[in-house]
Amino acid sequence: MRLLIAAIGKLKDAEERAICARYAKRLDASGKSVGLGPLEIIEFPESRAGNVDNRRRDEADRLLQSVAAVPLKIALNGRGRSYPSDVFANLLKKKADSGVKSCAFLIGGPDGHGSDVLDACDFELSLGAFTLPHGLARVVLIEQLYRAATILTGHPYHRA
C-alpha cells in the first residue's frame, strides 16, 4: 500500500527534515516486504486568507485535490482516535490486505482542518493528547509508519 502525507506547512527546520528523511528511507526499505510504501510527502504553504474559516477552506481544497484519487484518507486531528503502535500496524496491514492500494495522511495548518477534510476522510487519527507543532507531528507520524513496518516484519526495533 503506497503511503502519502499531504501537509500544510513546509518543514523549515533542517533537523526536522533530516529526521523525516531518515525514517522515510527506513520505511521505504523495511516496508517493501509487508507491502507498505513507498512514502511520498506533499507540502503546501499555509493559506494567507484573512480569517480562520477561509484559511481552513483554502487549505482543505488543496489537501483534498492532492489526494482525490487515494481510496483511504486519514486526517490527523487531536480529537481523533489514538492507537497503540501494534494496533496501528495491524490496521494498516488489514487495509493493505483488503486491497487498498494507497493511503493518505492529511496534516492541516495551524488552524486545524476544515470540515471538508474531516468529512472526506475515512477516520481521524490522533498522535496523542499533546498539541504538537506540525513539523513534529510529521516526524512522529513517519516514525510510527516505520515502526508499523518493523512490527509487521518482526524486526526488533519495536520492543514494547
Image (tube, grey):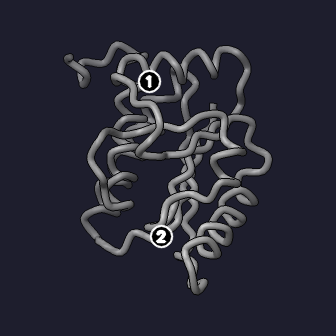
Residue 31 lies, with reference to residue 118, above or below; the image says above
Q: Is residue 23 above or below residue 151?
A: below
Query: In the picture provided, is 113 more to the left or to the right than 70?
Result: left
The quarter in which the C terminus is drawn is: top left
Residue visible at 57% across and 78% down in the picture:
47
Tag count: 2
Q: Which residue is mark 1?
A: 88
Residue identifier under label 2: 9
Q: Nearer the viewer, residue 8 or 110?
A: 110
Under mark 1, the amino acid is: Phe
Residue at 24% over, 25% down: 157
Element at label 2: loop
Q: Which residue corresponds to the image point at 54% horizontal and 66% vertical from the top-left? A: 43
Residue 60, percent from left and from top = 66, 62
- Is there a contact, CB below 8 Å, between mark 1 and mark 2? no
Which residue type carries mark 2? Gly
* 120 left or right, relative to 22: right
Q: Position of residue 108 (x, y in %)?
A: 52, 59
Mark identifier at residue 155? none
* Residue 1 x %, y %: 63, 30
